[in-house]
Image (cartoon, rainbow, N blue to C red):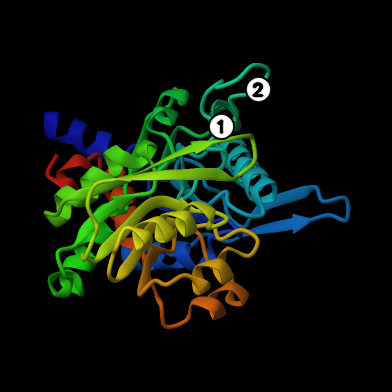
Amino acid sequence: MSTHYHQHEMKVYGEIKLFSGTGSPELADKISKYLGSPLCGHEVIEFPNENLFIKLDKSARGQDVYVIQHTASPVHRNLMELLITIQTLRLDSAARITAVVPYLAYGRSDKKDQPRVPITARLVADMIEVAGADRYMTLDPHAGQIQGFFSIPGDVLTASHTITEHLKMTIWSQLKDPVVVATDLGFAKKGRNYAADLDTPIAFIEKRRSGNDAKAEALTLIGEVKGRDVLIVDDEVNTGGSIAQAVNIVKQNGAQDIYLAFVHPLLSRDAAERLADLPIKHIITTDSVPIPEEKMKYLQGRITILSVAELLGEVIKRAHEGRSVGEMFNE
């Protein structure tokens, strides 16, 4: 009797059904191949007034559904498409809906750090829940406390292990006295995780923001880089301003070869050209956000894009089967 009940519990959500948003087709395709589960068909129509309309090809009633969609540029189109897809599935009676959001927008708007401002990260979390998501998955949010904005359970993952494993298998042993450099004190804890994984010392750049725009003023380097190869780490590169300042300050302090590693290649405006002009040896990033061809052309030969499909695919599989995700990272 108990065995029968257990089997019923494990299958309560039906089959895995994967849906790809228009923002993440390549990543969704790789996740689909990893799981051996085809992507489900649905129409996404944008009317002349920019309103979106979504229709599923087949019913998802009683199924365990995963909607894969980043919310980087175009942010509001991708976010609305995610929300409308989730609501469509909720109204179609899907048993469980998980929003798989490799990059979550508005991650920097996570607190009231001055009067008369919003906490937009909380609003985005509320919208995902109200649309009908039962769970969420995301990678390397800018601030850890964003997890607390969701009332639904979620898996907040990091691609740092993917990046450090790649480094250890490729160039790390050839570097001269390598040191990890965190781009600011806000990234110090995550930077320390990179340094611990790579068994190397860490240095920090202290900077102060002087306004509400994306610019910041880099001030000082805490730590030793003279005569050493440097790995600058961050969670995302948006305009490339902070990275450019970081590269310049470690160069001024006598660094040798410089490498960059970051998870989310947002590369807004002329960020790709800016990175191409910097005196760096190589860039390591992921496919959490696709890099358009017109930006890739500036970085060809100097960039390695690691896929997060296997990481997300394995977590989807474990979530579906009711198994521990922490075991993947020995936690």
Compared to residue 265, the image places residue 176 above or below, namely below
The answer to whether residue 308 shows anywhere in this view is no
| Residue in the image at 58% along x and 32% along y | 124
In this view, the residue farthest toward the top is 115
Contact? badges 2 and 1 (CB < 8 Å)? yes
Left or right, residue 107 beside residue 250: right
Dot placed on the residue nearer the N-terminal end, 2 or 1: 1
Query: What type is the residue that disc 1 sits on?
Result: Ser
Q: Secondary structure at mark 2?
A: loop
Between the residue at mark 2 and the residue at mark 1, the CA separation in whole angstroms equals 9 Å
In this view, the residue farthest toward the bottom is 301
Measuring from the top left, give residue 30's x and y in whole percent. 40, 67
| Residue in the image at 29% along x and 71% along y | 257
The answer to whether residue 165 shows anywhere in this view is yes
Query: What type is the residue that disc 2 sits on?
Result: Val
Compared to residue 122, the image places residue 56 above or below, namely below
Q: Which residue is mark 1?
A: 109
Numbered badge on residue 148: none
Measuring from the top left, give residue 181's x and y in whole percent. 30, 52
- Of 252 and 325, the residue lying toward us: 252
Q: Which residue is mark 2?
A: 117
- Of 74 and 2, the residue lying toward us: 74
Instruction: State the quadrant of the C terminus.
Output: top left
